[in-house]
Image (cartoon, grey):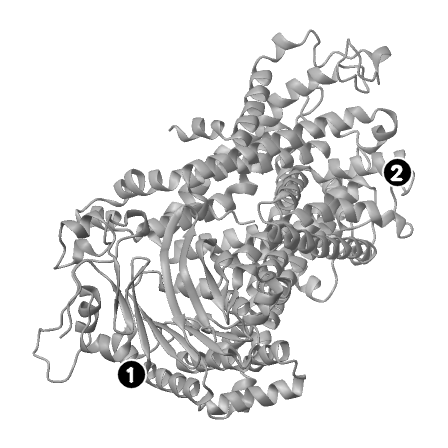
Amino acid sequence: MSALLELQSLSVAIGKVALLDGIALTVERGQILGLVGESGSGKSLTAMAAMGLLPLIGGRVTAGAVRFDGQDMAAMTEVQRRRLRGGRIGFVTQNPMTALDPVQRIGAQVDVVSRLHLGLSRDEARARTLDLLTQLRIPEAETVAEAWPHQLSGGMKQRIVIAMALAGDPDLIIADEPTTALDVTVQAQIIHILGHLVRDRGVSLLLITHDMSVVAQVCDRVAVLYAGRVAEEGPVGPIFAAPAHPYTAALIGCIPQAGMAKGSLTGIPGAVPSAMTFPEGCRFHPRCPRASQACRASPPPILSRGEGRVACHHPEVSA
Amino acid sequence: MTAPLRAFRRPQGGLAGGWLILVIAAALAAPLLTPYAYDVQNLPQAYQPASARHWLGTDEFGRDLLTRLIYGARTSLSVSATAISISVLCGMVLGAAAAWFGGWLDRAVTMVVDLSWSFPEILIALILVAIIGPGTIGVMIAIAVAYIAQFTRLTRAQILTLKGETFIEAARSLGAGHAHILFRHLLPNALAPVLVSAMLATGDAIILEATLGFFGLGAQPPVPSWGGMMSAGSALVFKAPWVIIFPGLAVAVTVVAINLYGDALIAELDIRSRLRREA
Amino acid sequence: MLSWLIKRLLMLVPVFLAVSVVIFSILHFIPGDPIDNLLKIGSSPEARAEMEARYGLDRPLPVQYLIWLSNVLQGDLGTAIVARRPVADLIAQALPHSLRLGGLALLFSTVVGVTLGVVAALSRDRWPDRAIMGGVLVGSTMPSFWLGLILILIFSVGLGWFPVSGARGWQSLVLPVLTIGLGGTALVARITRVSMIEAAGRDFVTLLHAKGLSPLRIQLRHVLRHALIPVVTILALRIGWILGGAVTVEVVFARPGLGTLLIKSLSQHDYPVVQACLLMLAMAVMLGTLMGDILQALMDPRVRAAMT
């Protein structure tokens, strides 16, 4: 059986600027894949590509393909893709504050998904909405359904967005930094709820985040994105135990851990280059402690490593 | 100041700018361009349609329409441009003072501006012409006053934005006086959007001038103005429609040209966001 | 909501007073004495004084203002000096014509303008958009009296479909409504297009696409709803412009109405009538703004929340 979502050497450009370069990712059924990277690495663009929504932001696929359940999304009609969106693929956006239509009541915004994709009647859809809100631990679901978006807090709005993603009974949820815009205390709750609901239903999740600790908590596999390319990909356990790519190692070094000496938080010097000025060779080399002549000259080879792979001229050899 | 020239390189800007130059040149060189006088009546020749002798025909008094159109451009353009210059000057002073000094002055200016802004310019101008009396000067003043609110508003908004910027605070902390900061720093920076919107307003003023002329309140006969040429109104629609059609076309084409050239200029100066033409 | 409405109405009182002072005092600067128009040439100074006393023109200005204001508030707009009839009668005769014309023109420009704006926004930068925006530019640069004359030329003189002037039957309304409406249409189409494009770029629209709604439904049910909020606000502020357009167009088509009355009274220096006309227009502008606020509140729950 084919993987649920597969990005096959996907390259994406907006205008003349190439932003994603040969991204290969696989999300298996029931699996949670964490997609990690700093801002500007192309995470959100990957999400838009997987949703087939690139035209909205003026982007297009220049090479490779997105396959959902074995089918090439580029070969589908727009109507078929629309049936996937909201139906088999749910989407959770980055900023819940601006994600809801401010002039429509909460309930109606959730109802529409199950009416559209599951063919439910108005009443059935509302019953399903209330049920979902309750599962998301929203108190007084009926009151909330009648409320306007501006009456809810950020955390509450993000639960509504998650409810909308679940309402179409999806096989896959793509969550683009679902907690970045929220308070720290609320972040943990939302991740917790999302993780549980996904596991309980056997739904796959593509969780985009810049927070390695979130990945460690909920994901099965992790893919690290740097400047539009996958640096390292594999099961969470081995990668956290022994990251092969220096960038992964640096990202993991950014998680504060109990018992860590003060000041040992390894920040990564520098920033992700902009797409106009991607360096030659390995795009990480200007920030890399292990950079050599080879790194400056040619893109790194993709090496397989256990169940994962790494794109590096000088990967850390695990014991 | 190369932006006005660069605007010509855009296709629409070039075409529109070309027309404007043509109209202005024709207005300036009027006596050289036409063998006819604008004011000599020739009743036997009245209501002639277009012909080789009278390219656009003649009016109810047998005067050559093209000649009157060219001389009319003098009146219409100079009245509108002068009027708008006056309102730009007054508006900039009022707007800058209101924004810079704030307090009761700002509140008073804002209230008057808001109040007059909700009345159409044509009404304000009509009443003012009634007070001052018809004629070129009356129309000029009426148009000038009718547009002061717009420039006061725009200048005030520009200055308020600039006021908070670092270089102004720096000048202030160096002990620069009110007048120095206003005239050396704030107004020059607010100038581009104000001048561009002044240009666009000149287009509106040409329409307003024509409307007042149509009501018989503008330049008094026999001096032609585009609006005045149409004041015979619906009576002529049956008999000699060209007398109505051509002056109106001249107004419409010129105003379209001003808008297109203005758009090209806005694009060149990259000030669309600062302008936000209050639709 | 009710208390907000009352507060909002109370706020109109000082505005009304300010407007009334302006209207009253401006007109006393108008040169030309209406009494001159009434008196026979060579009348005695006594006859003049008697006439001035009859119309209250011999009192100090502030007193004249207060008398005028208190009369106005009681619905007494004075007596027309030239027509020698109660101004209220003249207004009552003219107002329905102008309201009908203005209302229909407003309706026309809203419906047609929003439609064109939506089509332009949906076909952004392609030929329908360019064609519509080109037409809008041309439409907004034609003097309305000229447009009226051209319409008369084509449809009345040329095709004979509609009467040239007057106010008899619905046929006489078609051309005047078109004349005012086309200018308004240009304005509405431009705002609708811009705010549709602006609203379509908002975050929540991305999520609507991600929910699998059809683009047309997203544009018409969600984006357009947002785009209409500024359209309504600006239209309400521009009620005055529509009425201003009515003034010129009424004259072109020789229709009875506030505009014709105003122009005629201005040239006859008939103060009380001019004052009343301006006051009516000012009230229309104020009510327009109020209506705009109310409509905005009905369309946007966030505004409603801010009201209480």
- The answer to whether the residues at label 1 and label 2 have Cβ atoms under 8 Å apart is no
Query: Quick one: label 2, few (<14), some, or many (20+) residues within 10 Å?
Result: some
Q: Is residue B22 above or below residue C8?
A: above
Task: Give C18 or B111, whichever is nearer the viewer.
Answer: B111
Disc 1 residue type? Gln
**Real-space Cα separation, disc 1 to disc 2, in angstroms:** 79 Å
Query: Which residue in the structure is indicated by mark 2?
Result: C156
| Helix, strand or loop under label 1 | helix
- Residue B230, image quadrant: top right
Give the left or right position of residue C257, taking residue A103 as reference: right
Task: Give C279 or B85, whichever is nearer the viewer.
Answer: B85
Give how far across and how far down residue C205 sits, in percent: 52, 65
**Mark 2 falls within which chain?**
C
Give the left or right position of residue B268, taking residue C44 as reference: left
Give how far across and how far down residue A47 sits, in percent: 42, 66
Query: Which residue in the structure is indicated by mark 1?
Result: A217
Q: Is residue A62 above or below residue C17?
A: above
Q: Residue at 56% of width from left, 34% of height from top? A: B260
Q: Residue at 64% of width from left, 62% of height from top? A: C216
Q: Is residue C301 above or below residue B55?
A: below
**Mark 1 falls within which chain?**
A
